[in-house]
Image (tube, rainbow, N blue to C red):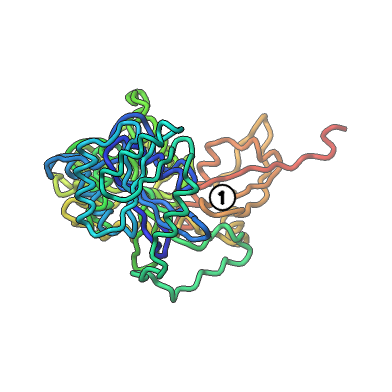
Amino acid sequence: MTSENLPIVVIAGRPNVGKSTLFNRLVGRRQALVSDEPGVTRDRKEGEALMRGRRIRIIDTAGLEEAAPDTLFGRMRASSESAVSMADLVLFCIDARAGITPTDAHFANWLRRQNRPVMLIANKAEGKAGTDAALEAYSLGLGTPLALSAEHGEGISDLMGEIVDRLPHAPRQVRHRRRDEEPEEPEEGEEQEERPAGPLHLAIVGRPNAGKSTLLNCLLGEERMITGPEAGLTRDSISVELFDEVGPIRLVDTAGMRKRARVEQPLERMSVSASIEALKMAEVVVLTLDATLGVHEQDLQIARLIEKEGRACVLALNKWDAVEDRVATRKAISDRIETSLAQVRGIPVVTFSALTGAGVHRLLPAVRKAYEVWNSRVTTGELNRWFEEMLDRHQPPLVDGRRLKLRYMTQVKARPPTFLLFGTRAEMLPDAYKRYLVNGLRETFHMPGVPIRIQLRGTKNPYADK
C-alpha cells in the first residue's frame, strides 16, 4: 500500500479457485503464497499494480465460505467481506474446470446485494475446452465471464484493460495524508541511500501465538488481521501502512517462526521463508514474546538472525497483564537477554497487552528511538579521541610475539553503525579486543540495542618481501 489512496480492486471467490495466483500476475511478482492446498490465504494481502500507466491497489482475500462467525472460516469470511465493502471493483473468481458450485452461486447472489461493480472471472480456462466451460458462468447473472488462466498468463492483458475501463476516472479522496512535510536532507558526507525518503519499514516477528497479529490490530485500531486462540493463524507476511506523530510506517506482520526441525509441511516452510524475507527488508524489527512463557531458545535464535542482518530491534513483551510477578519476570528476561545476546546489549524492552491495549502506546516511540540510534553517526575527530583513550586504557594484545599497531578509526556507514579500523596487521586483531571496542562505542556514543560492525584494514610493510 502506498501513501496515496488508489483505486481498489478486490479479488474474491471460494477457496482454491486461483485468487492468489491471479493476484501475483496482476502485481507482477510472486508476492502472495500459492499452494495446491485449499485455504492458504487467510488475511487480506495488498499490492500495487500498474495498468495502462495507472497505479491500482489490488487486494487478495481469503476464500468465501459459509461458516459460523466465531469460527476461523467465519472470521476469514468477515475479513473478505470487509475488503469487498471498500472496493471500487470486485473480481469474482470461479474455477472454470470445476464448473459452477453451490458456493459460487450463493456468494454471487451476495455480491449482487453489495452495490459494488463486479467483474466475473472464469479462471483455469486453459485452451478451448476451458473457454467452453467458462460459458456456464453466465448462469450466475454477473455479466459476461472473462475466461483466463492466471497460472499460464492467458488472458491477463485483456483483464487489465477491462479493469482500467471499469474503474472510476475521478481520483479517490485523500485521507490521513500529510503533504506539508518536506523530506529530510542528508547529512554532510552521508550517502543519499543512507536516509531514503519514505516510510519507516517495521516488521513484527516472533514465535507462533505470541500475539503479533493482535498487536498489529491494536496499532491500527481495527480488526485488520485474523486473530484467535489457534496458533499459526498468520501464514503470509502482510504489509499495511500506519501513521504516528512523526510520519508513515510500513508495518509487516509475519507468520510465526518455529524451530527448523519442527517445520515439516511445505506451506509452513514457505511461510517461514516469507517471514525471514520481511525481516531482511525491515529497518526496525519488533521481536514479540509471550511474557507468560519467558524467553525461549527460539526467541534467541530469531534475535541472533536480526543482529546478523544488521537490523535495529525492539523486544516486545506481550500479555504483560497476565504476568503475576512482574518484577521477577522482567529481571529473568533481562538477565537472559543480556547473557545470551551480548552483541546487542541494551536492547529496548516494552511491556504491554495487545489484547487490552494497555502499554501499546509506548511501542512506536521505542521503535522511532531504535531507528534513530540505528542511523547514528560519529564524527571522525570525536571517534579518534575516544579511540586514543581506549588504547591508553587497554593496549592491543600481542599476536605472534608482536604488538599490533592500531592507528585510527572512521565510520564508513550507518544502518547499522559500521566502523573501519586501520593499523599494521589490524586484520589479526582478536575477537575479544573487537568486543572491547564495540562495548566502548555502545557506551560512549549511546548506541544501545543495535548491531555495531567493526571492519579491519591492515597496512602492508613495503620492505616485508626484501
Above or below, 3 against 309 in this view is below
The answer to whether 65 appears left or right of 454 in the picture is left
Are there few (<14), some (14-19), or many (20+) residues within 10 Å of tag 1? some
Q: Amino acid at mark 1?
A: Thr
| Residue for point 29% across, 50% down | 142
Above or below, 186 against 307 in this view is below
Q: Nearer the viewer, residue 302 or 214?
A: 214
Outermost residue, bottom direction? 180
Q: Could you tell me if residue 347 is visible in this image?
A: no
Check the picture and name the quadrant holding the N terminus: bottom left
The answer to whether 232 appears left or right of 413 in the picture is left
Instruction: Residue 39: name its quadrant.
Output: top left
Mark 1 highlights which residue? 418
Residue 170, position as x, y percentages in the image: 40, 70
Q: Could you tell me if residue 358 is visible in this image?
A: yes
| Residue for point 39% across, 52% down | 58
| Residue for point 82% across, 34% down | 464
Instruction: Residue 103: name its quadrant.
Output: top left
